[in-house]
Amino acid sequence: MTKGLTMRIAGESGEGIIVAGDILTMASARFGLHVQTYRTYPSEMRGGPSTFQLRVDHEPVLSQGDFVDVLLAFNAHAYTENKRDLREGGLLIYDSDEFSPADSERGVAVGLPLTKIAQKEVAFPQGKNIVALGALAAILSLPREMVAEVVAEKLGKKSEAVAQRNAVALQAGFGHAQENLAEREYFRLGQGADAGEFLVMSGNQAVALGAIAAGCRLFAGYPITPASEIMEYLAANLPKFGGDVVQTEDEMSALAAAIGAAYAGVKAMTATSGPGLSLMTELLDLSSMAEVPVVIVDAQRAGPSTGMSTKTEQSDLNHMLYGAHGEAPRIILAPTDVQECFNLTVRAFNLAETYQMPVIIATDQSLAQRTEAIRRPRMDDVRVVQRVRPELNQEVTYRRYALTASGVSPRSIPGERQSTYVATGLEHDEYGHPSTNPDVRKAMMDKRFRKLEESAKELSGARRFGAQRPAIGIIGWGSTEGAVREAVARANAEGLKAGALYPETLSPLPDEEIRSFVREVKHLIVPEVNYTGQLAGVLRARYGVQPIQVNKYTGAPFTPMEILARIREVAVDGNRNSHQA
């Protein structure tokens, strides 16, 4: 029985590849398998190369993997562009109505007449993707009835005639695969032990669900790839919990609306990507200065400018850390997988409410649109923090920005008696009155940054894995953790003594954990999906280390093999800087 399997469907945007992949993912999870997906698609509405990759296993899936075990190609271009990723001995399934591969040097090639099946047998040319879905489901040995249920759920809102054609297309693909693929070409995983226990979600959906669980009641946003699914999920679900979703005219208005709602007493959030974060910068400062809590999601994509809107990158870190006129404290959280997208969104709202400042959740396209099977969250176990409210006294004038040991001042809701104040972007005194007094200025700057220092005391620091006392250390952030985990495990199996440290927060950084880690290791590698090595620059400036940068900026995430190759190089050659993966 095969332990794990990676499958990829490749074709053109508009051919339903993503829909077929989503259905296969859902069915695999219901079968009790752990799943992780990776998708590529062009920025055009139709046309251009598109792929959907699904990795399944009986154990948790950490990354998209190194190679593809099964490649299903809709056309010759899809085959040519993806054949290098097919592992030796893998299975190529191709649409024999579209092309015949000139070579199959990397594996076994089997042609299926997908187009003819859809046109002739099913009389539904648009159902080619469902025919392909049936073939892949048969290869995985998924129960056809289970897959059919997911097809009906996913596409059930269409007409009865279309639903019937989809059912016929699924059966046709399933049957042709069983008839035409030899037994040795099957990849039988068998049912997982946790059938029915998983919730299949993308990173974006997990962020949205975490916001609901944390008590968010206002989301304001402007559509932008790859963050738009957060707004779409909340538009469908937040009103069920008494919340509202507002689509504003631009990104500046979105953050302004969220800050306004938070000022009025509502937990609020917005979500964007790099171009939108650029426009929001001034309002980030306002949130810091006025001490209004707000949560901002930055689903990073390849820049600069419009860049590659559908490709991944970790290139906004410097902007998230330093994007401001003046010095404006903010907390930055970096989830590493879909489960953490839920957990850290709840944490983000709690931190924003506690410390009355902006909290940024740093995801990226690969994580935001990746699908994983996560444990169903128990809402009763979710810890939700409410804001610190003032004890109003008619004999004492309310000081909204009272100087306290923690820097946190009780915050009223507009309209409450004896608690009127002005929330302003001007420097101000304890009452909110504008002030340029040097002593007041120093006290208020200290107050705002004291909150950031206080927040570090309750944050969980960083997560370590790998060798206990590694010779080769890795510090990374965000979505690269899965590939690094796999690479570190393989390196240790080879006797290379590698370990890694992943901070949960990028602001404030877990100083004690990082200093301890860098003292232990002989060589420090910092892998990042950007050109300049932005975290490496922070580590160099803050801790005086000279990290070995490993940078990838192709629009695709790291594979475990790319990280492992650099670990091996460092083990042999020492501190040789390797700029491109």
Image (cartoon, helix red, strand yellow):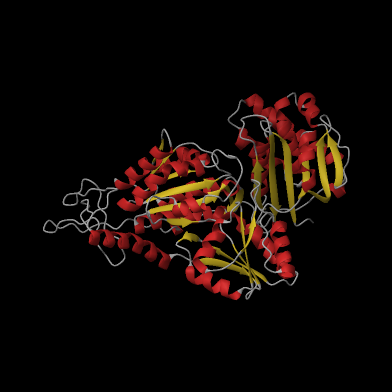
Q: How many numbered marks appear?
A: 0
The reply to whether residue 358 is visible in this rendering is yes
In the shown orientation, is residue 119 left or right of residue 14?
Answer: right
Residue lying at 78% horizontally and 51% vertically, measured from the top left:
188
- The residue lying furthest to the left in this view is 395
Horizontal relation, residue 43 to residue 435: left or right: right
> Looking at the picture, does residue 250 appear above or below residue 182?
above
Residue 229: x and y, percent? 52, 40
Question: From what the image shows, is residue 183 above or below residue 523?
Answer: above
Question: The C terminus is located in which quarter?
Answer: bottom right
Q: Position of residue 360 (x, y in %)?
A: 45, 52
* 80 or 418, nearer to the observer: 80
Name the residue nearer the viewer: 4 or 230.
Answer: 230
The quadrant in which residue 225 appears is top right
* Looking at the image, residue 41 lies above or below residue 460: above
Say which quadrant the N terminus sits in: bottom right
Q: Position of residue 80 (x, y in %)?
A: 79, 39
Q: Position of residue 245 (x, y in %)?
A: 41, 38
